[in-house]
Amino acid sequence: MKNPILGIIGGGQLGSMLSSAAEKLNIKTVVYSDSKNAPAKHFCDEFIFGEYDNKGKIKEFEKKIDVVTYEFENIPFDTLKEIEISKKVYPKPEINKIIQNRFFEKNFLNNNKILTTKFKLIKSKEDLTKINNLIPGILKTCTLGYDGKGQFKIENKEQIEKLKVDFSKDYIFEKFIDLDKEISVILTRFGENKYEVYEPFENKHEDQILKVSKIPAEINNEIYNKSKEWCIKISETLNYIGTICVEFFIDKHNNLYVNEIAPRVHNSGHMTINTHNISQFENHVRAVCGLDNIKTEKLFNGQMINLIGNDIIEYRNKKIKSNEFFFDYLKNEIKPKRKMGHFTKIIK
Ligand code: ADP
Ligand code: MG
């Protein structure tokens, strides 16, 4: 069988790393992005610039590819559905529709007996007066938030009165967890009960942005097993194809909660390029392109540091050792709070 041509919607660093993984497998990539000089332009075979709801441009893209995936969840449902009429789309648009909305996502989890933080849907200023039992907490947009964007921490009632919120969008208000640790589990599902799952990554955030991930995570066996089990259950229930990431909170009493799901490759798994025989990116490309799974094994423990904003400058001139790997996303401009690259260290 001839290798399919893979379409990737989104041209950020995840799109770049997916393209590189595809190249290794001899699979051609066409990246579609709404940013003219998206980083993935440097890594893909062909690049199309267009808005995510531009029907004409999407048609042009559709003609060039056999299967479509995406590197971020905020793509209009209608766009994915339209493509699906003639081409395969993984993960399925219906799955993305659930996950791209925090309210749908949390309901899906709770309906499947998976614990999340306590939350309430907020549609108006008035709804915000009914959240006493959830304070201190955090107001999050239901859609389009990432890296802490669209989030407001609320410590007391007075802060609610001062809050300026655009209620043309829906929000959830979430109770703060007394956090001990954050972990994530990444899995690639190829079909029914056919998956490759990575061990949990331990993650540290600064300003709500991931800063460091490492394996092994310092967690007990129960949390190790339960987090993997929940990730498997989520992917089986969704009949998912491709790489999925589940982010977890662990509180000071060792309770495990799902924070959120990413229907895609995930920042916490970047080290898999260097720590495993098959990376999360290669596994994703394999799954969505219908290739077989290869038993995924850890070769080394490791640590990944995100290079945010000006962090990148030092690393561009740094001497890199043989157990270190530096990835520069080649973004046009350095901006604060923006992921510019990452640095992985493997422990031999
Ligand atoms: P994003 O979609 O931007 O990643 P998250 O909901 O994952 O948003 O929040 C980003 C980070 O903020 C989390 O990884 C965690 O560190 C912190 N955070 C978010 N919600 C809570 C909460 N309910 N309790 C404690 N910490 C939280
Ligand atoms: Mg998150």
Image: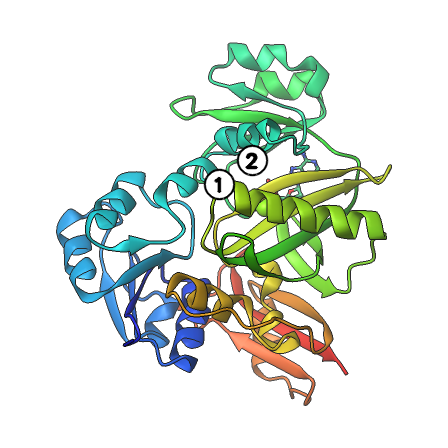
- Check if mark 2's residue and mark 1's residue have beta carbons within 8 Å: yes
**Label 1, on which residue?**
145
Q: Quadrant of the C terminus?
A: bottom right
Q: Can residue 286 be seen in this view?
A: yes
In the image, residue 285 sits, relative to residue 132, either above or below, namely below
Q: Is residue 148 visible?
A: no
What is the image's colouring? rainbow
In the image, residue 103 sits, relative to residue 200, either above or below, namely above
**Tag 1: Cα neighbours inside 10 Å, few (<14), some, or many (≥20)?**
some
Relative to 332, 152 lies left or right: right
| Quarter holding residue 94 | top left
**Label 2, on which residue?**
151
| Quarter holding residue 100 | top left
Q: Does the residue labelled 2 lie within 8 Å of ligand 1?
A: yes
Q: Is mark 1 within 8 Å of ligand 1?
A: yes
Query: Residue 326 appears at what percent x and percent y?
Result: 58, 78
Q: What element carries label 2?
A: strand
Residue depicted at x 60% and y 78%: 277
Query: Residue 23 appears at what percent x and percent y?
Result: 38, 79
- Cα separation between marks 2 and 1: 8 Å
**Name of the residue lying farthest toward the front:** 192
